[in-house]
Image (spheres, rainbow, N blue to C red):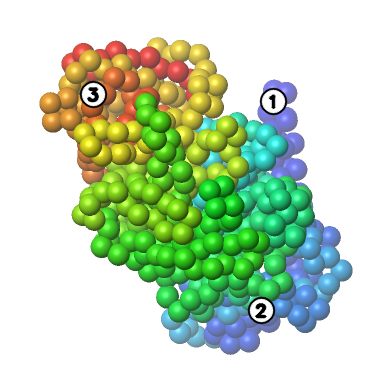
Amino acid sequence: MKSLRLLLFMFCMTVLSTVHAEDKIMFLSSNHVLYRLDTKNYRYLFLPVEDRAEMSNVKVLANNNQVKAINVRLASEYTDYYVPLDLSEFAGHELLLDIHINGNLRNEGAIKEWACWKQIKYSNTFDIANREKFRPEYHHTPAYGWMNDPNGMFYKDGTWHLYFQHNPYGSLWENMTWGHSSSKDLVHWKYEGDAIEPDALGTIFSGSAVVDKKNTAGFGKDAIVAMYTSAGESQTQSLAFSTDNGKTFIKYAANPVITSNVPDFRDPHMFWNDDINKWNLILAAGQEMNIYTSDNLKDWKFESSFGHGYGNHSGVWECPDLMKLKVRDTNKEKWMLICNINPGGPFGGSATQYFVGNFDGHKFTCESAPDVTKWMDYGKDHYAAVTFDNAPDGRHVALAWMNNWQYAAQTPTMQYRSGNSVPRDLDLFEYEGQTYCGVIPSKELFDQRGKKLSKLSNACELVLNLKGSSSVTLSNDNGEKVVFNYDEGKRTFSMDRTKSGKVDFSEAFPVTTTAPVYGKLKQLRIFIDNSSIEVLDAEGKMAMTNLVFPTTPYNKIVKKGKVKYIIYKM
Ligand code: FRU
């Protein structure tokens, strides 16, 4: 009874805390509306969004000057969800929305009937509590809205910072902004708000951030310096810096700092190179990666480009990274160049390829033959993988975007869209004359292990100890299943998600992915989290990341062959 009263109270509070807008709406034509905001007392204006509606271009005018421009699918028939427009930054100004609605010609009256005008409302709070069963529990996801690539990741003073391609005004790709989350343990993430917003040079595409320990840029000792792609009429590279540990950024006044006439010219990744005592930068330029040097992070000298004729070229080269890594069980160190590519992945769409070789600070030389392609992960949902700057103990910790451009806009979630992979530490290992990337589940994941479970749960780690070929099937009460198959003779591991649950939102989704196995698999660590399965070899010699959307969690395991398992709650 008590709890019922509490519920009723909470319900009333929620209703009272949002008010319907009594603003002045001026319908000026079949596609143009001026909307005068009436109240100054609320923090947020909630814009009603319908994902199928035509796009509206909304300019926010404060005292007659444009202070923001966003693209929102304002609801025409039905509100799928709300997105918050934060009014606090414009306090004390007269606010007017200048709205241009795109799409088919409609008669002048029609626009008045749109659902959004009746459903727009004010509030002082924005509820980001999870409302969706597919949202992962121990993976980073955006508090709300669309997310793609991880950006500008760095570690400083015990905190891991993750920025990400964010749409704060919808759950589809648009309005690219750097969202920000932080974590003490790479597992629990706190949303910190949006850090870098679009400006007159363009929206904010992917990039990197470094800790400028020697104040080489003059923004301050230990300033965080970020470089991102300004995606305007052309793609150019811009700087922003932060002197409050990445919470807020100031854009460098003389942006852009790198330009080119190559159309796909983006995703700069900077790092300090001790070997030459300079900064390096690698960015994607068409089907190649350009390499630059700098002393001050502002002036960059083009050095060389890599890629012509090497590896897979069936798509656009994007989101590079370049790092020196130890080769396991040897005294050797080699360089690895990461090249995310879309499309062209081994099972269609997006994937992460890499090249191993040498780098003298000016030029990268690949040690394998040009026709060798190496993939970091053999699932379908591992993209835009890059590493953190300044990670402790010389670690190279990577996160990927767990999705694929083939169907990222169709996955069955709405409050948020897409998560990141679990953190993985990268190194190199040798096998039959080649050097490969080792992908090891980061040690922080051990600390996350909870009690042992006798049954599978929606968020758990399933550890498989294998002795030879075997197969393991996970299934649920609705007959949906995922099948893993390890063939020791053929040296392959596969995962079949064709009957894994909801698969019909895209023809490209129901597939079996297969990975080569370099040696024998002994222990697999399988991270299951509501809508993702990451199969990682404990020794880092095989990685497979796949989304799944079971209508109810998998709760049964059937195994064949010599295999034992342990389940930990996560
Ligand atoms: C990769 C990518 C990047 C670009 C960003 C835009 O997924 O296409 O190349 O910077 O997404 O959101």
Q: Vertical placement of 52 versus 147: above or below? A: below
Residue occupying image coordinates x 69% and y 25%: 3
- The one of 502 and 322 positioned closer to us in this rendering: 322
Amino acid type at image mark 1 = Ser
Q: CA distance from mark 2 to mark 3?
A: 62 Å
Which tag is nearer the camera, tag 2 or tag 3?
A: 3
Secondary structure under the numbered disc 2 in the rendered image: strand
Can you tell which quarter of the image residue 237 is in? Answer: bottom right
Q: Name the residue at 75% across, 43% down.
A: 13
Left or right: 148 in relation to 354: right
Q: Residue at x 70, y 60 (%)?
A: 217
Q: Quadrant of residue 370?
A: bottom left
- In depth, the one of 548 and 191 nearer the eye is 191
Upstream in sequence: badge 2 or badge 3 = 2
In the figure, residue 405 lies in which quadrant? bottom left
Q: Nearer the viewer, residue 546 or 522?
A: 522
Q: Earlier in the sequence, mark 1 or mark 2?
A: 1
How far across and down, in percent of the image, does residue 357 sit? Answer: 35, 48
Give the number of the disc on residue 545.
none
Asked if residue 533 shows in the view, the reply is no
Give the percent coordinates (x, y) of residue 465.
Answer: 30, 16
- Answer yes or no: is residue 67 visible: yes
Q: Nearer the viewer, mark 1 or mark 2?
A: 2
Q: Which residue is mark 1?
A: 3
Residue position marked by numbered label 2 in the rendering: 98
Q: Position of residue 476 (x, y in %)?
A: 32, 27
Q: Residue at x 23, y 18 (%)?
A: 559
Amino acid identity at mark 3: Lys
What separation in Å lies between label 1 and label 3 (alpha carbons)? 55 Å
Q: Which residue is mark 3?
A: 520
